[in-house]
Image: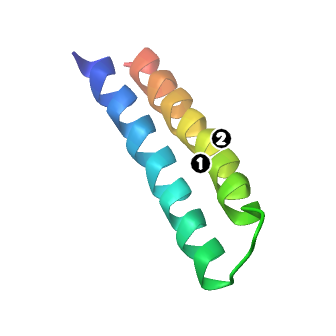
Amino acid sequence: MKYGGMASQMGVTIFLFVFLGRKLDNYFELSPPYLTATLAIVGVFLAMFLVIRQLMADQKQ
């Protein structure tokens, strides 16, 4: 059950970065969604980093 929370954390992290990217693209009136794509990739890497860090901390216990 502990790992289900990690999946939710990943989904929320990626969602927030994509949401922020869309808002910024609309604010700056960018036609191709450069910021959405960039922040989505950043969100995926950040989510993976957080999960790996949490798994390594659980492994040490």
Secondary element type, mark 2: helix
Alpha-carbon span between mark 2 and mark 1:
5 Å
Q: How many marks?
A: 2
Q: Please tell me whether residue 57 is drawn above or below residue 17 in the rendered image.
A: above
Residue occupied by mark 2: 45
Three-letter amino acid code at the position of disc 2: Phe
Q: Is residue 18 left or right of residue 8?
A: right
Residue drawn at x 68%, y 84% as measured from the top left: 28
Residue 60 occupies quadrant: top left
Q: Please tell me whether residue 23 is drawn above or below residue 40 in the rendered image.
A: below
Q: Are marks 2 and 1 in contact (CB under 8 Å)?
A: yes
Residue drawn at x 45%, y 31% as measured from the top left: 54
Secondary element type, mark 1: helix
Which mark identifies residue 43? 1
- CA neighbours of label 1 inside 10 A, class few (<14), some (14 to 19), many (20+): many
Q: Nearer the viewer, residue 48 or 30?
A: 30
Q: Is residue 36 left or right of residue 9?
A: right
Residue drawn at x 61%, y 40% as measured from the top left: 44
